[in-house]
């Protein structure tokens, strides 16, 4: 269907909305100690406070994308912002762990309704250079928000503005939500799929079960020492995923529209984008977890100092993201991805060397050169992810394509702390924090080398494609 072009003001509103759910992934981490003392929360309860947000977010993304396609992406986006605002207020007013967990669950639902609409709206309302620039901004803001959460959370906890303590990390969302709600109706065009597609209820339940099993196991496994219920959840994950695939194939063969269309998953760009997401975003979240733990437990930094240590990384990331559009136009997506991997891997080697030469006196300034290199490289990789993943998605499947990529991205972000965090924990039990962070960064280097190899072998996903609606 024909749609209005997105104005610069509309793009800014969508990007402001994008900040909300991304920041809340990381901002809570630095507030956990304060929450534990205030609400007398156990380690399991703290793990649930973090996990239920990501679980609800990942489970409901595909449903959010389908709702936007059917009833209007702006309408669902605004509903998501409203839900997120109410949930953030409830988080800030929580007087018990159970109330906070329930509010975080609602917050995840609101986030899942917001995020697919942003990328889908960019995909169907912009073309050419404007589309490429918007995707670069989308990738830049998305990654930067993860780092802003670390820094802003540390600042808010340290400043204790108004005596709100940890509650301020949730209440800070309210003015942003209000701005987005007031502005979006005027500057964001309404778009939807020309034909209404029924919701795939069975597929939604199977997807919810699969992601719920995986992310609950990842969240509670380390806390519960991988007892049998956690292992059972892990074993159920591939079984439910297989059931989801079979159900989707049957529904598509009958002419229906499954929640995660197999035809979409057969597109070269989408398939490589999902591979990239699993390898890179699990490394990214695992890196943030392991480095923050090293700075605080190994080098004795406060949460505020630890957050500030990521400022150079975030600044370099944003600069790189702003340059990514010109880079991809000049050199292509494949060259930009390989360049990003090369720069990031150089930064990881530099960080290993920095820790070894400066330990145990490594300070924030000492880490700047290595972390800036890492952030600059990461920006090219993230921008490549969205460009590659959406490159051959037809306009009428924009919501589903955005939801598929975002679902795997969020699941990978949940996988990272278990994967690299598990390596870190095992080495630190039998050695020093220096040995633990060295081993963890070495594993990340190996995974990034695998991504480089797969990129070199896979040329089909990088062919220029014009998606038709």
Image (spheres, helix red, strand yellow):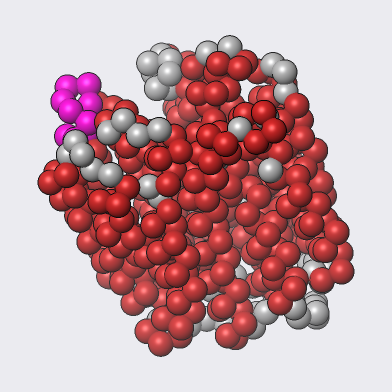
Residue 313: x and y, percent? 39, 56
- Up the image or down, 217 lies above or below 190; here it is above
Work out whether residue 360 can be spotted.
Answer: yes
Q: Is residue 99 left or right of residue 189?
A: left
Residue 409: x and y, percent? 51, 51
431 in magenta: yes
Picture residue at 57% right of the left edge, 36% below the top: 159
Residue 149: x and y, percent? 54, 45
Quarter residue 454 falls in: bottom left
333 in magenta: no
Seen from the viewer's position, the closer of residues 250 and 72 is: 72
What type of secondary structure mainly makes up the magenta span?
helix
- Up the image or down, 467 lies above or below 442; here it is below
Q: Is residue 178 left or right of residue 313?
A: right
Picture residue at 76% right of the left edge, 30% below the top: 90
Find the magenta span and give its range. 428-436
Q: Is residue 265 left or right of residue 323?
A: right
Picture residue at 67% right of the left edge, 29% below the top: 164
The N terminus sits in image quarter: bottom right
Work out whether residue 438 can be spotted.
Answer: no
Seen from the viewer's position, the closer of residues 76 and 170 is: 170
Residue 291: x and y, percent? 33, 41
The C terminus sits in image quarter: bottom right
Quarter residue 65 falls in: bottom right
Seen from the viewer's position, the closer of residues 33 and 244 is: 33
Picture residue at 43% right of the left edge, 53% below the top: 311
- Up the image or down, 327 lies above or below 64; here it is below
């Amino acid at each position: 269907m024909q749609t209005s072009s997105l104005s610069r003001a509309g793009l800014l509103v969508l990007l402001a909305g994008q900040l909300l759910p991304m920041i809340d992934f990381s901002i809570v981490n630095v507030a956990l100690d304060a929450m534990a003392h205030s609400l007398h929360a156990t380690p399991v309860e703290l793990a649930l406070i973090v996990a239920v947000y990501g679980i609800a977010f990942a489970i409901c993304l595909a449903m959010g994308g389908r709702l936007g396609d059917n009833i209007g992406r702006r309408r669902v986006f605004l509903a998501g912002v409203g839900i997120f605002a109410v949930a953030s207020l409830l988080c800030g007013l929580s007087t018990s762990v159970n109330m906070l967990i329930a509010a975080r669950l609602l917050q995840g639902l609101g986030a899942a309704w917001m995020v697919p609409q942003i990328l889908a709206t960019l995909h169907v309302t912009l073309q050419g250079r404007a589309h490429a620039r918007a995707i670069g901004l989308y990738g830049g803001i998305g990654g930067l928000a993860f780092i802003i959460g670390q820094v802003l959370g540390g600042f808010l906890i340290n400043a204790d503005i108004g005596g709100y303590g940890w509650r301020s990390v949730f209440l800070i969302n309210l003015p942003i939500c209000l701005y987005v709600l007031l502005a979006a109706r005027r500057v964001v065009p309404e778009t939807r799929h020309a034909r209404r597609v029924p919701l795939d209820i069975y597929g939604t339940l199977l997807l919810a079960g699969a992601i719920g099993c995986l992310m609950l196991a990842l969240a509670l496994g380390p806390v519960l020492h991988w007892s049998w219920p956690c292992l059972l959840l892990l074993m159920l994950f591939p079984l439910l995923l297989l059931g989801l695939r079979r159900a989707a194939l049957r529904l598509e063969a009958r002419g229906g529209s499954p929640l995660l269309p197999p035809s979409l998953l057969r597109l070269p760009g989408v398939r490589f984008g999902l591979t990239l997401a699993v390898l890179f975003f699990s490394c990214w979240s695992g890196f943030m977890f392991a480095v923050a733990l090293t700075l605080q437990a190994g080098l004795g930094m406060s949460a505020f100092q630890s957050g500030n240590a990521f400022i150079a990384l975030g600044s370099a990331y944003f600069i790189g993201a702003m340059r990514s559009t010109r880079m991809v136009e000049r050199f292509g997506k494949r060259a930009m991805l390989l360049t990003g991997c090369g720069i990031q891997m150089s930064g990881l080697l530099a960080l290993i060397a920095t820790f070894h030469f400066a330990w145990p006196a490594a300070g924030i300034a000492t880490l700047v050169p290595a972390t800036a290199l890492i952030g600059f490289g990461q920006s090219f990789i993230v921008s490549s992810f969205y460009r590659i993943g959406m490159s051959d998605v037809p306009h009428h499947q924009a919501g589903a394509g955005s939801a598929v990529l975002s679902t795997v991205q969020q699941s990978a972000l949940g996988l990272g702390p278990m994967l690299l965090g598990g390596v870190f924990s095992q080495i630190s039990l039998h050695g020093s924090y220096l040995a633990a962070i060295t081993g963890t960064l070495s594993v990340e280097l190996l995974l990034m080398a695998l991504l480089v190899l797969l990129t070199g072998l896979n040329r089909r996903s990088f062919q220029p494609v014009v998606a038709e609606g």
